[in-house]
Image (spheres, rainbow, N blue to C red):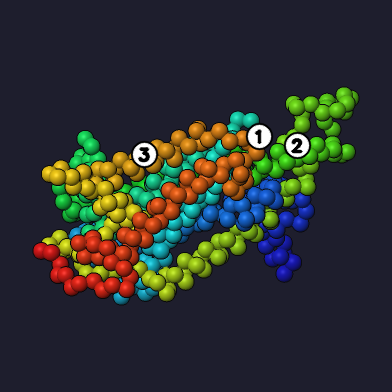
Amino acid sequence: MAFNMSKWDRLVWTWRPASEREAGDSVVRNLLLHWFPAKVTKASLSIRYSIWLGTISALLFGILTVTGAILMFLYVPSVERAYASVKDLEFAVSFGWFIRAVHRISAHLMVAVVFLHMLRVFWTGAYKNGTAVNQNRPFNWLLGIGLLLVTFLLSFTGYLLPWDQLAYWAITVGTNIASAAPLVGEKIRFLFLGGNEIGQNTLLRFYVLHCFFLPLAVLFLFSWHMWRVRKDGGLACVDRLALEEKNAQAAPVASKTYSLLGIAKGRTVHVETSLVDHDRHTVPSSPNLTRRLLAVTLITLAVVAALAVFVGAPLEEAANPRVTPNPAKAPWYFLWLQELVTDTTIKIGGFTVNGALVGGILLPGVLVLLLGAWPYLDKSSVASVGVWFAKERRKQDMIFLAIVIFILVFTVIGTFLRGPYWKFYWPWQGWPEVPGRF
């Protein structure tokens, strides 16, 4: 029995170190823990700062990878058999409905959580460089924007795979908006569809993009993103803490030597640490970070499982190109674009403003470019880095909030208030009976 306990301890000691020395060794000797620094600041562990949204995004991607791998054994990427294979998952395969629901809900949640993570980074000023040298947080912000766009594409390509009416016409709306891009729009649509209409080539291309190229892109960008977080000195709240320490003119720690061999007196900028009292503000990553990570993982799994059981994944009739749903809607995360296309389609006499070009391409393009340039245009001081809604950033925070509200309002309108022929209906108004268009 003692031998078994010793063997067990040898396996798990890195996750529950008995001393600070073991805590440091555990990060070096454990492949999974090697991802983390030996010590982490208490501020970084606080849910009030980061809400752990980045971690939740990574966990959702992990869930998508595992469930997606299982679904690949059961799904047939063929227009003749795709719908039937999904229907078998729902009604014939043991717990197939649950695996599919977990996969779909995780995909939707990942879109939402990555978006919320971007909002958190902006409103805490975490895209700005702080007090440490060789930081490049604006570039990491660009990597985050790339991750958001790839996440949209990952969910969008998966939307078609059930090959039901909801999927078919949502992709039709989305690709029609993309075709409005000047010069290259039709070529992009042709490239995505593998032809001039949605068919076998489209399904196969979306399947390969969804299962291989886009997950690979997410993994690459995520790894680069996390590497840059480490190179930039951790979360931006650490810079705020370092700035507060320096402003406080903290006394030197008696147990530390600040000069060569302790011969010279005082401290210089070359030997002074960024956090004067480092031990007071940091704790070992194992077990402090790992325990919180386990808790966030269990909560995320519980939420996804509960939504899978009580909400599930929809499956409408098999895709039929001859029957158009009225209204035909894009995926929910693109509904604000569809609404914007409608509102920017304006007739002036005999001239019509192309809403798909203005609202579907130009305005979103300007928005993405503005997001990318924002860190380089922001001239606020380092005192605002790592601070929720810093006073000196109030104006730009309000502008950004207005943009977010605009997107959310248009999403709600497109989701709940648009009926047949894309007319506006209040929730208490009934929709007229309109047959599908042949």
Residue 322 shows in the view: yes
Quadrant in the picture for the N terminus: bottom right
Marks 3, 2: nearer the viewer: 3
Amino acid type, residue under disc 3 in the picture? Val
Amino acid type, residue under disc 2 in the picture? Lys
Residue projecting furthest to the left: 438
Give residue 171's quadrant in the image: bottom left
- Work out whether residue 163 or residue 286 is closer to the camera in this orientation and state it: 163
User: Mark on residue 131?
Assistant: 1
Q: Position of residue 151 (x, y in %)?
A: 40, 50
User: Mark on residue 438?
Assistant: none
Q: Earlier in the sequence, mark 3 or mark 2?
A: 2
Give residue 166's quadrant in the image: bottom left
Q: Earlier in the sequence, mark 1 or mark 2?
A: 1
| Pointers 1 and 2 in contact (C-beta within 8 Å) | yes
Q: Residue at x 40, y 52 (%)?
A: 406
Q: Which residue is mark 2?
A: 246
Q: Earlier in the sequence, mark 1 or mark 3?
A: 1
User: Mark on residue 366?
Assistant: 3
Residue 74 shows in the view: no
Left or right? Give the position of 192 relative to 105: left
Label 2: how many Cα within 10 Å (few below 14, some 14–19, many 20+): few
